[in-house]
Amino acid sequence: MAIEQLMSLSADLIDTGRLSTRTMPVEKLMLEPHEKPYHLAFAVRVGVLDGRHPAHRELALRRIAAMLLPGGRLFIDGGDPLTELALPPQ
């Protein structure tokens, strides 16, 4: 539901290429050949980031960091305000 809500409320940003979404297992996350690295990442209900699967947390953080520009930031839906997670050095 969160992704659908984001897409409906941000259609103009998606249409102009300023925002994109992914729905996939984080352990398979990687840039597509045509994609440029991102400035920000938001994770919604990702078990390895919210404590449900701690054994895979470091892999997930490395995968996300690899998709971001240096200094990129990761936020999760940890309530209001969003929770920022530290990323491993790239």
Image (cartoon, rainbow, N blue to C red):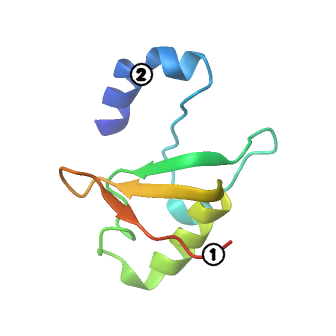
Distance between the Cα atoms at labels 2 and 1? Answer: 31 Å
Residue tagged 2:
10
Residue 37, percent from left and from top: 69, 48
In terms of image quadrants, where is residue 84? bottom left
Q: Amino acid at mark 1?
A: Pro
Q: Is residue 80 at all visible to an observer of this figure?
A: yes
Q: Look at 49% across and 50% down and name the residue there.
A: 41
Which mark is nearer the camera, 2 or 1? 1
Front-most of 73 and 17? Answer: 73
Is residue 36 left or right of 58 when viewed as pictured?
right
- Identify the mark nearer the N-term, 2 or 1: 2
Residue 7 against residue 75 in the figure, above or below: above
Residue 54 against residue 35 in the figure, above or below: below
The quadrant in which the N terminus is found is: top left
Residue tagged 1:
89
Front-most of 19 and 29? Answer: 19
Q: Look at 34% across and 20% down and name the residue there.
A: 9
In terms of image quadrants, where is residue 49? bottom left
In terms of image quadrants, where is residue 55? bottom left
Contact between marks 2 and 1 (CB within 8 A): the answer is no
> Under tag 1, what secondary structure?
loop
Q: Amino acid at mark 2?
A: Ser
Local crowd at mark 1 within 10 Å, few (<14), some, or many (≥20)?
few
Q: Is residue 29 at all visible to an observer of this figure?
A: no
Is residue 30 left or right of 7 when viewed as pictured?
right
Q: Which residue is most to the left?
A: 80
Residue 90, percent from left and from top: 68, 71
Residue 88, percent from left and from top: 57, 76
